[in-house]
Image (tube, rainbow, N blue to C red):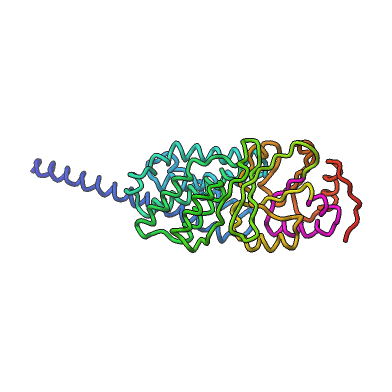
Amino acid sequence: MKLFRKKNMGALFLLALVSMQVTSREARASDLQSVRLCLDSLSSVHGVEEYERVVKTCFELAKPFAESDSVSGISLYLQTLLAERGLRHDGSREFYRAIASEGQNYFVSHLQKYLGNENLRRLSEVELLDALEALDTAVFYSSLVYAEPAGLGDELRILETLTERKLATPAQATKVFQSLLGNSEWERAAGLTKSWPELGSLPRIRREEAPGPGELGYLTLSADLGTLTLKKYAPTTGPAILIYGDCHFAIEAFRELSAHPDFVKAMLRYGLVVGSPNNTDFAAIDSWRKQFPAFEIHPLYKTGAWFERGFKNTASPSFAFLRNGKIEFAFEGALDGLTEKFRTGLKKIGLPVSGVRK
């Protein structure tokens, strides 16, 4: 009888242990799904306060997975970490550099080891999708400061793995495509369009002037829209005007500035407008430059040391007025005080303005 009890006690203990493990796994999966649902809910949130509250909730839900060995857990934590850090947004270079660095450091120390070619084959669809979302966010923040993102190649390999399994979607391909463009990987982005015709086609790149470490690189679209020529921008003498922006607010600002003949004259001779490298609507770029040649928008290739000098490409539009290679005056924003600020900038670099409007 005692032996029977001992045998049964052992069996019951093993049964309880297995039951505890199953329950733990189920709880773990449930907790991960809670984080996913929380992140998904951000797309339907209204108002800044509610957005901040939901982001903080997602971050707290993901914290237990920060040091886990779960690919999904680590990936979800990285997403929520960047979202939570983003709440402190002040638009400064230091902010973007700090958040990009934190995201990249966490990725390298916790997630990258799981994303080698052999490991990718063992990951489930859910794990691959979680990692893809995390990398997309981390690479985005790095592209804002033009830092070399550690996860860009991994992001592409995850998409290739999903494609091999016939699980990839055009939406996922678009995310990777935009990541490649945002990090000046035009050739790799063009290669992706061969597998995903939905992405459209890219003009070929002609490298006329490769920008150096301290030079800004931009692309000029040919008249037939078939070629983008890489050029460098590094004015060292005389006046220069550098503008970043191609969003709705920037377009409205350029329309306003185009009503001033002195502004147009200055831009035609001394100005350069660069826009997002992710803007591939080349027909629209061509139409715009025909209407407003003084404010022709050139896709940005890389900023080089310009970000360090004070040129901001984290707000659109952004304006910098230079003399002898040094930024003398800069401002951001659209129509609020635009004309007077632009006039002030021209005066700071020694260009004449009459204040006459068409």
Which of 7/88 is in front? 88
Q: Nearer the viewer, residue 78 or 344?
A: 344
- Quarter that holds the N terminus: top left
Asked if residue 205 is among those painted magenta in the image, a careful observer would answer no
Residue at left offset 52%, top offset 62% = 200
Residue 242 lies within the magenta run = yes
In the rendered structure, which segment of residues is drawn in magenta?
241-268
| Residue at 47% across, 62% down | 197
User: Which residue appears at 48% of the width and 60% of the height?
Assistant: 171
Using the image as rendered, state which of residue 258 and residue 124 is in the foreground. 258
Query: Which of 235 and 25 lies nearest the eye of the viewer?
Result: 235
- Using the rendered view, name the quadrant where residue 239 is placed: top right
Q: In this rendering, would 147 be left or right of 75?
A: right
On screen, residue 7 above or below 48: above
Q: Residue 234, percent across and down?
A: 70, 39
Q: Quadrant of residue 4?
A: top left
- Residue 240 drawn at (x, y percent): 77, 43
- Where is residue 38 drawn, in percent x and y? 50, 55
Report the quarter where the C terminus lies.
bottom right
Q: Is residue 65 above or below residue 50?
A: above
Predominant SS of the magenta segment:
helix
